[in-house]
Image (cartoon, helix red, strand yellow):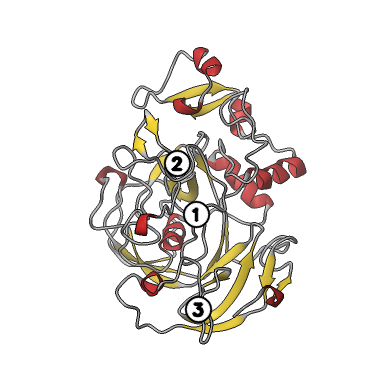
Amino acid sequence: MLGVSDIQPMGVYGPAHAWVARPIFVCWSWAWPGPAGPHAAGLGPGTVRSAGSTGVNLVHMLDMCSVGLVLHAGSGMVPIPAGVFMMGTDEPEIRQDGEWPARRVHINLFYMDQYEVSNAEFEKFVNSTGYVTEAEKFGDSFVFEGMLSKQVKAEIHQAVAAAPWWMPVKGANWRHPEGPDSNISNRMDHPVLHVSWNDAVAYCTWAGKRLPTEAEWEYSCRGGLENRLFPWGNKLQPKGQHYANIWQGEFPTNNTGEDGYKGTAPVTAFPPNHYGLYNIVGNAWEWTSDWWAVHHSPQETHNPKGPSSGTDRVKKGGSYMCHKSYCYRYRCAARSQNTPDSSASNLGFRCAADTLPDDL
């Protein structure tokens, strides 16, 4: 069994404080008991088992017979193997969002951030570049009413007509997610919020990365599973366990916080999927590079990048505010959109790359 002594610090797949083990060869049997893959054999997400060993939660599975790489700590990237998957669904829950039809898509190997970009990581970017987000330039951003203090709420006299729980809050931005009387001092490991698509692109460029395409994002989200609602399968809470940070209770009046969080959670919270990605659904919405469209060709495609133009950009994954009764968008096939300059208290991102950046 792989022990701590097998892990060596290397500046290859993450920053200097990330830990990366030397490659180990692992080979799986395809004879899984049922369609659920490794879970059905008693292995948790992100777990690999080789001959004569027990499961090792640090190991990220590249594929069923491949080289495994131990990744631990830090905010590194993981390789997403090339493959083919069915994007979208022929059983859409929200037809107007263009979740359908299911279509065959080929994806080349690429790299994806294990975690959503955190406040700590975004702060490094801002300190290094002096970047000012669009929410800071505009002077306000949208915040969920239930997160606001009485003092801030008392000064607001407008809301979004179709969703009155969304309020424009002066002084709300990534440093002050609920307005000027809030801060992130105890949330540095939570996803950065109030970042527009333009802000996300600026960060990715600085980091030597890019935003994932919608196809790459969904392929990564599915983690090698086909025709499943969620990254871990079809049951929202397998064996009663919470796998994502979403809304429990009655939206928008009562969030019971049964998953442990009423707002965002640390980017490392909850089990990762089979590709080693944490919080790929729930917690914070994630921008993708695609322009928004709701009509898709059923034809087979290779590395699609979406429409060539548009007014809104695609976001995926849902957030801590999502509930089946209102926003059943924490499914792999689900999608939504915002204008590129939009920001909100449930909207973040993670990066992708064709090759590993030089400083990783």
- Name the front one of labels 3 and 2: 3
Q: Can you see residue 335? A: yes
Disc 3 and disc 1 in contact, CB within 8 angstroms? no
Instruction: Judge whether 55 appears above or below 329 on screen.
Output: below
Mark 2: secondary structure: loop
Nearer-N-terminus badge (3/1): 3
Q: Which mark is residue 46?
A: none
Instruction: Judge whether 310 appears above or below 10 on screen.
Output: above
Nearer-N-terminus badge (2/1): 1
Q: Residue at x 31, y 54 (%)?
A: 296
Label 1 crowd bin: few (<14), some (14–19), many (20+), radius 10 Å? some
- On the image, the x and y values in percent for residue 55 come to 51, 75
Q: Residue at x 57, y 41 (%)?
A: 198
- Tell which residue pokes out farthest to the bottom in this image: 51
Mark 3: secondary structure: loop
Q: Can you see residue 311? A: no
Instruction: Judge whether 86 appears above or below 119 on screen.
Output: below
Residue 199 sits in quarter: top right
Of residues 108 and 250, the one drawn nearer to the viewer in this rendering:
250
Of residues 358 and 153, the one drawn nearer to the viewer in this rendering:
153
Label 2 crowd bin: few (<14), some (14–19), many (20+), radius 10 Å? many
Q: Tell me if 97 is positioned left or right of 91 in this view.
A: right
Instruction: Judge whether 10 appears above or below 316 on screen.
Output: below
Q: Which kind of residue does numbered mark 1 sit on? A: Phe
Write down the residue under mark 3: 49
Nearer-N-terminus badge (3/2): 3
Q: CA distance from mark 2 to mark 1?
A: 13 Å
Write down the residue under mark 2: 320
- On the image, the x and y values in percent for residue 117 come to 60, 49
Label 3 crowd bin: few (<14), some (14–19), many (20+), radius 10 Å? some
